[in-house]
């Protein structure tokens, strides 16, 4: 919708991870270096953790994109609360091996034979486990056993575990010393800093052909960072809605006031989305407008009340004159009653 209005060649803030849009923040560059180092070891575990929406999955996808030209067989599983007995069927399925009706031992031997076949053909095997924080201790132990598979002193499988911060706590808290000793590298992704948030937004816009339309006010970047806490996925959500708002309102400049409207709408639509925090300038402006509106209405009421009093007085005078004897002064007709100027309904435009 807004892409055509702003002459963009794609959606800059889509929620689906796109490796081509990865922003090289300080943390993401460091995490990529750790990933590349870990993969160079060709064994054990590489662990990437971080809060929801910090870009962990996107980072791993960008890594695999870099490795696409290499001889590597990559299997992906989303753990989704897997327990111990469910891990081997999930791994076999990820490597496109039959798994139904097979015992644990049969599955383990089938997976090992496949890994040996890959190694014999000089193909490295890599298992990526996403949402790993939902794995039970028994499931983590099965993965450790898989990481121990080897032939001629060479590991047959390397595992990347991607999960939220509590994955680190789970590994430490469940007496998994053997698993910890198999971790080659581990990195925690943090939220973006203020200057990184601004650079992230501009990076994504320029990636789809943005030419300063819409124009973004400097204060907008500060407010987006504050409202999103520097979490990339939240930034995507806010900026996508902001561009949609700009399109619907046909605005070619977007500022913190436009963002405040969007945040208020999102707060009403989605539980948990904070309402727009007002900056001192916005609070001052809003307070001034409210006071001005109240003052104007009070003045209107005072003027109307005075006109009504004048009208009542004139009507009383008119009745009194009509009751006088005909010999008295000729009464004023209704058309001679002094017109009342300026009386209007409150809120009616002049």
Image (cartoon, rainbow, N blue to C red):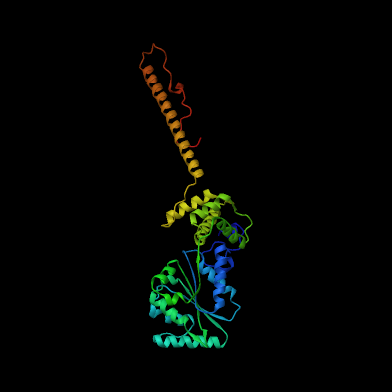
Image quadrant in which you'd find residue 297: top left
- In the displayed structure, 164 sits above or below 286; it is below
Image location (x, y in percent) of residue 319: 37, 20
Is residue 220 visible in the rendered image? The answer is: yes
229 over 49 or under it: above or below: above
Q: Nearer the viewer, residue 22 or 340?
A: 22
Please name the residue shown 57% across and 77% down the image: 40
Q: Among all residues in the image, which is located at the extreme top?
A: 327
Q: Position of residue 245 (x, y in %)?
A: 52, 54
Residue 11 appears in the figure: no
Give 245 or 179, whichever is nearer the viewer.
Answer: 179
Tally of numbered discs: 0
Residue ID at (54%, 74%): 38
Residue 64: percent from left, percent from top: 56, 74
In the foreground, 96 or 146: 146
Looking at the rendering, which quadrant does residue 24 occupy? bottom right
Q: Is residue 317 left or right of residue 349?
A: left
The foreground one among 105 and 13 is 105
x and y percentages locating residue 140 in the rendered image: 42, 76
Figure quadrant of residue 21: bottom right
Quadrant occupied by the N terminus: bottom right
- Whether 73 is drawn above or below 265: the answer is below
Image side of residue 266 versus residue 221, left or right = left
């Amino acid at each position: 919708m807004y892409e055509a209005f702003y002459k963009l060649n794609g959606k800059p803030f889509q929620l689906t991870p796109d490796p081509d849009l990865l922003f090289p923040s300080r943390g993401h560059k460091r995490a990529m270096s750790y990933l590349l180092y870990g993969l160079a070891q060709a064994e054990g575990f590489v662990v990437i953790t971080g809060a929801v929406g910090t870009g962990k999955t996107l980072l791993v996808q960008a890594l695999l994109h870099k490795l696409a030209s290499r001889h590597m067989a990559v299997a992906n599983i989303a753990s989704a609360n897997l327990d111990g007995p469910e891990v081997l069927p999930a791994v076999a399925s990820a490597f496109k091996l039959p798994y139904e009706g097979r015992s644990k031992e049969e599955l383990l031997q089938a997976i090992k034979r496949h890994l040996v076949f890959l190694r014999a053909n000089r193909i490295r095997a890599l298992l990526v486990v996403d949402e790993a924080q939902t794995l039970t201790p028994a499931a983590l132990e099965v993965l450790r056993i898989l990481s121990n598979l080897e032939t001629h002193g060479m590991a047959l499988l390397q595992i990347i575990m991607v999960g939220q911060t509590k994955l680190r706590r789970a590994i430490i808290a469940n007496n998994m010393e053997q698993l910890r000793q198999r971790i080659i590298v581990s990195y925690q992704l943090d939220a973006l800093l203020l200057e990184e948030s601004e650079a992230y937004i501009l990076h994504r816009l320029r990636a789809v052909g943005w030419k300063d339309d819409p124009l973004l006010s400097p204060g907008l970047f500060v407010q987006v960072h504050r409202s999103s806490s520097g979490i990339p996925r939240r930034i995507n959500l806010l900026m996508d809605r902001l561009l949609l708002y700009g399109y619907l309102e046909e605005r070619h400049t977007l500022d913190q006031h436009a963002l405040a409207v969007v945040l208020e709408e999102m707060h009403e639509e989605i539980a948990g989305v904070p309402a727009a925090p007002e900056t001192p300038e916005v609070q001052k402006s809003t307070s001034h407008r409210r006071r001005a509106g109240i003052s104007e209405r009070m003045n209107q009421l005072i003027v109307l009340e005075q006109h009504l009093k004048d009208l009542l007085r004139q009507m009383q005078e008119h009745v009194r004159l009509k009751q006088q004897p005909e010999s008295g002064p000729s009464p004023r007709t209704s058309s001679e009653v002094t017109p009342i100027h300026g009386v209007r309904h409150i809120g009616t435009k002049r």
